[in-house]
Amino acid sequence: MIKVIIVDDSAVVRQVLSAEISKARDIEVVAVAADPYIARDKIVALHPDVITLDLEMPRMDGLTFLGKLMRYFPLPVIVVSSLTPRGSEMAMRALEMGAVDVVGKPGESYSVGDISALLIEKIRAAAGAKFNRVQPQAPAQAAEAPAPLFRTTHKILAIGASTGGTEAVRHVLMGLPADTPGTVIVQHMPEHFTAQFAKRLDGDCAMEVREAKCGDLVVPGVALLAPGNSHMVLRRSGTQFSVEVKGGPPVHYQRPSVDVLFHSVARQAGANAVGAILTGMGADGARGLLAMRQAGARTLAQDEQSCVVFGMPKEAINLGAVERIVPLSRMARQIIETLSARPEAVAAGKGALQ
């Protein structure tokens, strides 16, 4: 049984989340707390497996509490935050400080049912997360790519991630050069949070990174991040790639979905694509990556040791969708080498696992 403590200053939110989470037979809400001081005492007494944490609270804000928690009593924390610019900025900071995931509070964009189903899945993933073993990676140096590759090809790089993915995606992109082929990314995040995430990545990386808009061209040197609460698919007109941002039902409880993106990349880019599936809960992206490999694309997965949650990569590996298994520390270099490989090298390397 997974033991959970809910920390939120709103009595209504505490009541709603407690009632919804308790519907899962494998999860027990052992306590609720209106502020970090109450939460501190209950954490010490009850030793929960996971905490859900609001960030905007009286007496002590959630970020201050999170910092103290990570230092003195580290355990998996899922941030439950308002879908506002301030809320998204604070949530990004929380992820950098050690929170394993973030969900938005119920509102106009997400119903109670949507949030509850997603939160239950995230609690299950967080309970098994290796968060305390995953330290912030040293900033990667953007590598130099072979000059002929990025000037002459119409390649596409597609990346998918979920729990633990914000730091993994950041680490990968920071290791890629400014002229990397057009890149499309799905990171499971709520609406509005993705804009803040893209902004932070853009400041850290050699590539330009921005939240995707419908019709954006996929061109070298630009990484497009799918916006929260919308699917993103690749489109092709002649030799030009672009993205479509659209609605639609969640896939694997997710919108945006990695599977939706990867399937479109398989159809539109085929052997001109490289796909990478990073840390994350569930199976989203596994079948899409398989479709990419079957279409001739090169496919990579993050290894278990460096994943916060070895869910999505594991599912992809089990399906036979993965050509190479790579530690996060080497993922950017492997992507560059894979994009750079000559056709004969690609043929020789098919089926290799390392």
Image (cartoon, rainbow, N blue to C red):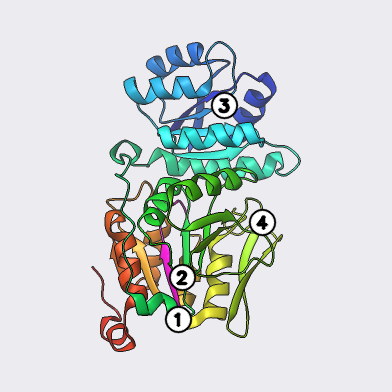
The label on residue 54 is 3
Residue at numbered disc 4 = 230
Which residue sits furthest left?
Answer: 354
Q: Range of the magenta residues?
A: 271-282
Q: Mark 1 falls on what kind of element? A: loop
Q: Is residue 69 above or below residue 337?
A: above
Left or right position of 117 against 183: right
Tag 2 and tag 4, C-beta contact below 8 Å: no
Distance between the alpha carbons at the discs numbered 4 and 1 = 29 Å
Which of these two is toward me, 131 or 136? 136
Residue at numbered disc 1 = 153
**Measuring 43% from the left and 83% from the top, which residue is drawn there?**
296
Please tell me which of labels 2 and 3 falls first in the chain.
Answer: 3
Distance between the alpha carbons at the discs numbered 1 and 3 = 46 Å
Q: Mark 2 falls on what kind of element? A: loop
Residue at numbered disc 2 = 181
Tag 2 and tag 1, C-beta contact below 8 Å: yes
- Res 23 visible: no
Please tell me which of labels 2 and 4 falls first in the chain.
Answer: 2
| Residue density around tag 3, few if under 14, some if 14–19, many if 20 or more, within 10 Å | many
Left or right position of 237 against 51: right
Distance between the alpha carbons at the discs numbered 3 and 4 = 24 Å
The label on residue 224 is none
Q: Is residue 305 above or below residue 234?
A: above
Please tell me which of labels 2 and 1 falls first in the chain.
Answer: 1
Query: Which quadrant is home to the C terminus?
Result: bottom left
| Number of disc labels | 4
Indicate which label's residue lies in the foreground, 2 or 4. 2
Please tell me which of labels 3 and 4 falls first in the chain.
Answer: 3
Distance between the alpha carbons at the discs numbered 2 and 4 = 23 Å
Indicate which label's residue lies in the foreground, 4 or 1. 1
